[in-house]
Amino acid sequence: MKELTKLQEKYYNWLLKQTLKNHNFPTRQEAANHFGVNLNAAQFHIVELERKGYIKQLPYSPKYKFVDVKLTISPTG
């Protein structure tokens, strides 16, 4: 897998944390709201995570899944 930028790492960690907490991958809108960006910016980072092989969009679905979870968040959050 390709290395992530610091911002992509923040997105990845937040997406993973939210998925573990809610048992569901967050929506693009939730990501946009959390990071204070517009929907297109959130989508860009999610697509980059997919392009780099960290997540994968499920076939025939807007949902994503984690491909190979690399926990890079600290235990305290």
Image: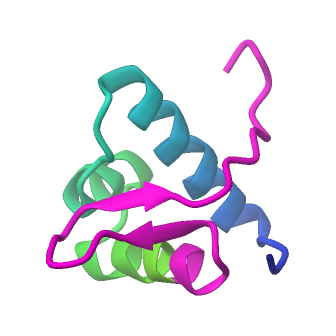
Indicate the quadrant containing the C terminus: top left, top right, bottom left or bottom right. Answer: top right
Residue drawn 65% across and 66% down?
Answer: 8
Q: Position of residue 73 (x, y in %)?
A: 74, 33
Task: Please give left or right for residue 54 compared with residue 46 in the image.
Answer: right
Query: Does residue 43 sit above or below 71 in this rendering?
Result: below
Q: Is residue 59 magenta?
A: yes
The quadrant holding residue 75 is: top right
Q: Position of residue 64 (x, y in %)?
A: 35, 62
In the rendered view, how is the structure colored?
Answer: rainbow
Residue drawn 48% across and 47% down?
Answer: 15
Q: Position of residue 51 (x, y in %)?
A: 58, 87
Q: Position of residue 76 (x, y in %)?
A: 73, 12
Prevailing secondary structure of the magenta residues: loop
Task: Please give left or right for residue 26 compared with residue 42 in the image.
Answer: left
Task: Please give left or right for residue 56 compared with residue 3 in the image.
Answer: left
The quadrant holding residue 7 is: bottom right
Residue drawn 62% across and 44% down?
Answer: 13
Q: Which residues are magenta?
A: 48-77
